[in-house]
Image (cartoon, grey):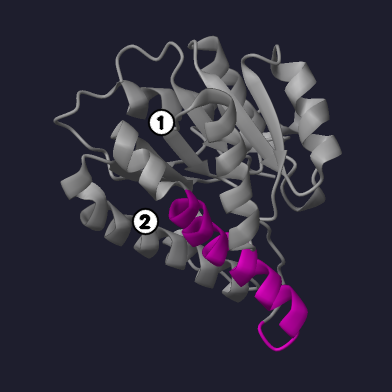
């Protein structure tokens, strides 16, 4: 995808944080971008910040529901006629010892983080076959490094990494590229956090956008299938 002008990307959870950073970067590269949020008003507000209506589409979707993702992809195809890049970014995190985390919070993480990436791919895969496109998941270093109070989050992100790598093998014959990005600490709105000057040491959302852009511009013969990324100098409080 050396020429990204008018290529179409769909980014779940694109109204803020990492998703917004990816959307902004791809727009600057000449792409058209659809962003989703569970609440349409949030997606619409972010879309107005990002760019003009002919370049940005706001859609509502709860990725834990396959029907929502199918409807979102249909809106994208109805507007632009194709889908070149699917970025499964939406995610949630709840942290507590395994004997204290509730069944409700456990299933919210599984349904959003793990089922969500499946639904995003299932809804978009036929369009990606036609465009010989790219499917990217945003996982986490928590998908390879386990930690106390993170059993639920670890389980889903380990699952996302495994799912993405297996999907990569399944979709290679269709010339669809598949990669997962595994960030460490990001200055995002994750888990209710409000970014501030104290987050300057962290990865910034636009840095993940640059990684996505690098993947799209990679020579077709080469596939970075799993990327770990972390702050250069972690905070040492």
Q: Is residue 32 visible in this depiction of the protein?
A: yes
Checking the image for residue 164, the label placed there is 2
Location of residue 14 with respect to 6 vertically, above or below: below
Q: Residues within 10 Å of mark 1 (few under 14, many from 20)?
A: many
Please give left or right for residue 221 compared with residue 168 in the image.
left
Task: Verify whether residue 111 appears in magenta.
Answer: yes
Percent x, y for residue 65?
A: 64, 63
Q: Which residues are magenta?
A: 98-123
The quarter of the displayed image where residue 2 is located: top left
Location of residue 34 with respect to 87 vertically, above or below: above
The answer to which of 41 and 233 lies nearer the viewer is 41
Please give left or right for residue 68 compared with residue 209 in the image.
right
Percent x, y for residue 164?
A: 36, 56
Location of residue 91 with respect to 129 vertically, above or below: below
User: How many badges with numbers are in the image?
Assistant: 2
Name the chief secondary structure element in magenta: helix
The answer to which of 203 and 49 lies nearer the viewer is 49
Task: Verify whether residue 161 appears in magenta.
Answer: no
At x 67%, y 76%, the residue is 107
The answer to which of 50 and 161 lies nearer the viewer is 50
Q: Earlier in the sequence, mark 2 or mark 1?
A: 1
Name of the residue lying farthest toward the bottom: 99
The residue where tag 1 is placed is: 84
Name the front one of labels 2 and 1. 1
How far, Cα to Cα, is label 2 from label 1?
17 Å
At x 58%, y 61%, the residue is 66
The quarter of the displayed image where residue 21 is located: top right
Tell me the SS state at disc 2: helix
Location of residue 46 with respect to 95 vertically, above or below: above
Name of the residue lying farthest toward the front: 78
Q: Is residue 203 visible in this depiction of the protein?
A: no
């Amino acid at each position: 995808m050396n020429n990204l002008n008018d290529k179409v990307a769909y980014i779940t959870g694109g109204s803020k944080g990492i998703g917004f950073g990816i959307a902004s970067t791809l727009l600057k590269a000449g792409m058209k971008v659809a962003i989703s949020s569970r609440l349409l008003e949030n997606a619409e507000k972010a879309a107005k910040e990002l760019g003009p209506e002919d370049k940005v589409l706001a859609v509502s979707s709860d990725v834990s529901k396959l029907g929502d993702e199918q409807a979102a992809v249909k809106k994208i195809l109805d507007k632009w006629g194709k889908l070149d890049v699917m970025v499964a970014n939406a995610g949630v995190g709840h942290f507590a010892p395994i004997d204290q985390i509730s069944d409700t919070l456990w299933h919210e993480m599984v349904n959003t983080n793990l089922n969500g990436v499946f639904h995003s791919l299932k809804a978009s895969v036929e369009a990606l076959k036609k465009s010989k496109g790219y499917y990217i998941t945003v996982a986490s270093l928590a998908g390879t490094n386990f930690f106390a109070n993170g059993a639920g989050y670890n389980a889903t992100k380990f699952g996302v990494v495994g799912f993405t790598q297996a999907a990569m093998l399944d979709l290679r014959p269709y010339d669809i590229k598949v990669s997962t990005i595994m960030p460490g600490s990001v200055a995002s709105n994750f888990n209710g956090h409000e970014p501030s000057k104290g987050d300057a040491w962290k990865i910034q959302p636009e840095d993940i956008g640059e990684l996505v852009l690098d993947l799209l511009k990679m020579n077709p013969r080469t596939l970075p299938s799993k990327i770990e990324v972390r702050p250069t100098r972690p905070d040492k409080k």
